[in-house]
Amino acid sequence: MSGDIIIPRAGVIGWPVAHSRSPKLHGFWLRQYGIAGRYDRLPVPPEDLARFMAALPKEPGFRGINVTLPHKVAVLPFLAEIDSVARRIGAANTIVVREDGSLWGSNTDAFGFIESLKADAPAGWTAAAGPVALLGAGGAARGVIVALLDEGAPQIRVINRSREKAEALAAEFGPRLQAVAWDERAAALGGAGLLVNTTSLGMQGQPPLEIALDDLPATALVSDIVYTPLETDLLARARARGNPVVDGLGMLLHQGRPGFEAWFGRAPEVGPELRAAVLAD
Ligand code: ATR
């Protein structure tokens, strides 16, 4: 075997996975830092997930994977250990193959969300300063909720079309969450320090997000996890009335940092060139 060089590898599993931006993100960092490594798109249909997860530790060089739809919850039974953030979100998006071949899982969506706000919000902005109006109650909302609770948000108003899902989140995450009916969404913006959209509304090919912003304080930060288009209608309207805004691309870029560091041994940075490269098609 002497002479064989095994390069570190990682990738993203999903089904479908063709549209994942993660290969661009990690590929950019590998090139930027001159690391001889690989990051691949790994299409894994649900019926192959168990086989894939069993084989992963045996693949030469494989340091770990990102996990995207529809596997973020389904991978949990294959992990020997998960961190507390993954446990609270109830899903894993970053897996590391440990030295002994066992699998460790984390969820970096909460980190990615809060880091993108810290990087892109006006200086001095903090989640602890006021109530949050949060649209949506799906998987993406869970990551944002965990992030905001950990940052000290005093109140999170969970506004969702299916009220029972907002109520279930409030029951699970405790008294700082408050379920709000979808019809009450405009009034729920009163006094908020942050408005965040975690629904798919406003995404290319999806219905528009209809919400009157009149009650939102002009100082409130507005963020949208949708990044196609980069400037959603929500962000454009918020910007036009003077609110600071943070687009959804930052969350995608920052959530990739912990995985890259674990697999390739270098803490990567998020900058304007990376944003441009990941956006380019
Ligand atoms: P994700 O994992 O991206 O959060 P999801 O779990 O399917 O995806 O959640 C999608 C979110 O967008 C939900 O909050 C959903 O509301 P429901 O819980 O009522 O389904 C919201 N959503 C999707 N389409 C919507 C629409 N037309 N009007 C209002 N909310 C919508």
Image (cartoon, rainbow, N blue to C red):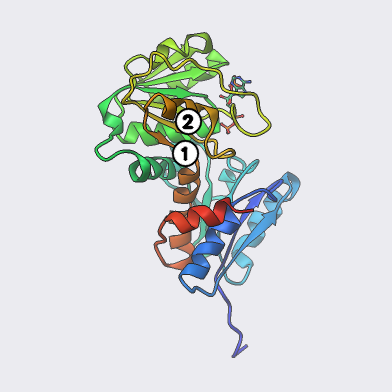
CB atoms of marks 2 and 1 within 8 Å: yes
Count residues near mark 1 (Cα–Cα under 10 Å), then give few for <14, some for 14-19, many for 20+: many
* Rendering quadrant holding ligand 1: top right
Task: Please name the amino acid that badge 2 sits on.
Answer: Leu
Q: Position of residue 172 (x, y in %)?
A: 44, 24
**152 relative to 265 in the view: left or right:** left
Q: Regarding mark 1 in the picture, which secondary structure is present there?
A: loop
The residue that label 2 is drawn on is: 235
The answer to whether residue 65 shows anywhere in this view is no
Examine the rendered structure and indicate whether residue 150 appears above or below residue 106. above
Q: Position of residue 170 (x, y in %)?
A: 43, 20
The answer to whether residue 189 shows anywhere in this view is yes
Instruction: Decide which of 57, 95 is in the foreground and name it.
Output: 95
Residue 76, numbered label: none
Q: Residue at x 52, y 24 (%)?
A: 136
The residue that label 1 is drawn on is: 247
Farthest front residue in view: 240
Q: Position of residue 45 (x, y in %)?
A: 74, 47
Q: Regarding mark 2 in the picture, which secondary structure is present there?
A: helix
**77 relative to 17 in the view: left or right:** left
Instruction: Decide which of 239, 227 is in the foreground and name it.
Output: 239
Count residues near mark 2 (Cα–Cα under 10 Å), then give few for <14, some for 14-19, many for 20+: many
Tell me the quarter of the picture where residue 85 sits: top left
Q: Could you give the CA–CA distance between mark 2 and mark 1, rounded to whole angstroms?
A: 7 Å
**54 relative to 174 in the view: left or right:** right
Task: Please name the amino acid that badge 1 sits on.
Answer: Asp
Examine the rendered structure and indicate whether residue 103 appears above or below residue 244. below
Farthest bottom residue in view: 2
